[in-house]
Image (cartoon, rainbow, N blue to C red):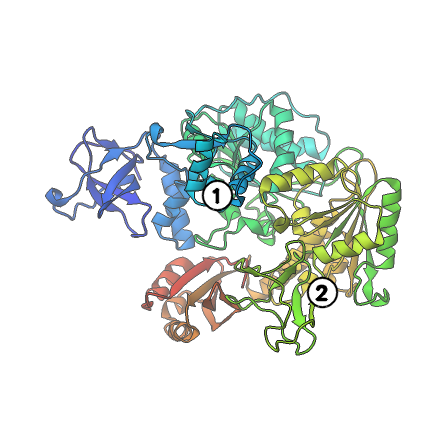
Amino acid sequence: MTERHFSQGETVGVLTTEPIGRVLDYRAPEGGCGSGDYVEVPLGPRKVLGVVWGPGKGDWDPAKLRAVIRVLDAAPMREELRLFLARAADYTLTPLPAMLRLATRAPGLGDPPGMRKVYRLAGPVPNQLTDARHRVIEALRGYGGAAVTLGELAEAAGCGPSVVKGLVKMGVVAEEDSPKDLPYPLLNPKGLMRLAGDQLAAGDALVHAVAAEAYQGILLKGVTGSGKTEVYLEAVAETLRRGRQALVLLPEIALTADFLARVETRFGARPAEWHSGVTMTERRRLWKMLSVGEASFVVGARSALFLPFQDLGLIVVDEEHDTSYKQEEGVLYNARDMAVLRASITGCPVVLASATPSLETWANAEAGKYTRLNLGARFGAAELPQMRAIDMREAGLPSTRWISEALAQGVAERVARGEQSLLFLNRRGYAPVTLCRACGGQVACDHCDARMVEHRFLQRLMCHQCGASKPVPVACPSCKVEGKMAAVGPGVERLAEEVVERFPGARVAVLSSDLFGSSRALKEQIVAIADGGADIIIGTQIVAKGHNFPHLTLVGVIDADLGLHGSDLRAAERTFQLMRQVAGRAGRAEKPGEAWLQTHQPDHPVIRAILGGDEEAFWRAEAEERRVQGVPPYGRMAGIILSGPEPAPLFDIGNELARRNGPLLSVGATVYGPAPAPIARVRGRHRVRLLVKAPKGVALQQALAQWAAQVRLPNNCRLAIDIDPQSFF
């Protein structure tokens, strides 16, 4: 790709965001256009967004070509971003227009300023309002006074645009022109933080990597509470001193509140944010300001990787092991891997930070592909928590209780001392199964092959695959007998019932993503807990992700065996990471912490590794097992997911693919399947999977593309290829 200008009438190649799969030829408009320009072009009867990708193919009669309608008022897409999108598309086997959609998520890019209207609360709220109007008011309050577009406000409130317009007529909601996009405040990287020991050495190494202005992969590995954030913020400070831009990726929106407070203390202002909790107006502002260098530091979710940075000097992937960096729908990509790709193209360092790195990252560091920086001790007076196992085979608990007497006594002691305890159970809802005690039938989702989970706080059954919900039935759907429906097994809501019963005077907080209507509400609850607003915290895996609760001194894992079951090749790795991360929430201030694991398998190698604390021994053993099996990171895998309204045609297609495996055999790959997916029906569509396994270093994507192109899919069937799958559902 080269940058050039095209004069009026010249043939240019324009990539649109439409699912056409190729670059289209157009004539350059009056005044011409250049490589990377954002343009509006005609496509059939519509006007669509596109980017000038380069010269056209020229295989059409120029007289028959349609002209570009106009060049948009936006900085051109830089060559490095176009190259990144093309490489990412090749790696993930994604059509290039789908990758471009990820890079053009700023709303209203083609709209003149006068067309953009935003809405905010304006006047007093009357007492008498319809439910729909009440929902609009609550949605606006949830945005904390920020102006929002009509579309996002109506969607957040679950109503039509006319409801919002009615409130405008009443004077309760104001309709305004979208404000002019303003630059973000300058961040002032003050002097060096007071680092010491390993922190100081790691901070110096990162500063030198930024100063080199060249690609370098760096694993920043430090025990929980060791100050990884403070260390990589030194690299951010150096990046800003050099007038360049920095990106920090976080796995969860809920983590941003504490992080933003740290940044504001360190740099005197907040960085820009990019995630689903940010309003459309703010997203558009950030997109525009980044592209002209008027925003220097972005904190974001995985999609922030596709923003139009003008001069990207550093990428940090915090909690790089976290599975939420893998997008499982639409474009299937792993943000950690894509961050490394973008850094290598841009020519800047990428820092992968974690207390429990993924085996892929650990192996790359062992092989010398990444520089490894270790933080071996906690920051300041904090010490690592002591670990112990509670053997549940000897606990003698009744079937309606899940907290052992030993753990209950430990919690009671903390409550009496004014300290916090965390009870961790990686299972949302009240109970994972609702069954009939008369016939044994379980309540399943109408649209998926999945059991529905009772959420007693919501008084509903919910499907965690498609989100469908329905009331808890009075009579069994199978045998019609009434009064026999029973909840089986614990979820965090049921655990909360037991806690309230056993500790009647304690303040209890439940942290589970589905209990909060907005990310803002979840953030507020986390801040309140960190300030001492609860005695006992009950949480799912959301509590394991980097939160700092200074008053927390005891972590109790209710079912440490939960992740060890099943055939997922990463089961041991994920259980190890999750347990170590959860345990790391304890003792992060002056008071020492403890982590107790309730387990029925105290002799399991993973449980022993967690208790023993010899992480390197665990990684070496896990790596050797993967090496013998020839699976990632010592081999390559791809998942193929066929989906459609009926299963039989999917198996026919899968069997045809399995038979016509010549392109895969040529690179030494093996095909397994077809087989029903573990959850064989989601949202009413049946799912069949194949798995491809290949040696490391082969040109797998090219072989997969040739192999998949051999079959013709019916219109109602879809085929998706997942390179480096993280989940096998």
Name the amino acid, label 1.
Ser
Q: Is residue 137 at least partly visible in the picture?
A: yes
Q: Quadrant of the C terminus?
A: bottom right
Secondary-structure class at tag 1: helix
Residue pushed farthest front?
128
In front here: 676 or 459?
Answer: 459
Tell me: residue 690, above or below residue 102.
below
Q: Nearer the viewer, mark 1 or mark 2?
A: 2
Amino acid type, residue under disc 2 in the picture: Gly
Residue 662 horizontal/vertical position (percent): 37, 70
Contact flag, marks 1 and 2 (Cβ < 8 Å): no
| Number of other residues with Cα within 10 Å of mark 2, as a class: few under 14, some 14 to 19, many 20 or more | some
Kind of element beneath mark 2: loop
> Front-most of 304 and 527?
527
**Which x, y percent locates residue 70?**
24, 33
Choose between 104 and 431: the one closer to the eye: 431
Of pointers 1 and 2, the one earlier in the residue sequence: 1
Query: How far across and down, in percent of the image, does residue 224 sit?
Result: 71, 43
The answer to whether residue 38 is left or right of residue 280 is: left
How far across and down, in percent of the image, does residue 109 sit?
36, 35
Residue marked by disc 1? 303
- Measured in 3D between alpha carbons, the distance from the residue under mark 1 to the one under mark 2, in whole angstroms, is 36 Å
Q: Which mark is residue 489?
A: 2
Q: Is residue 590 above or below residue 332?
A: above
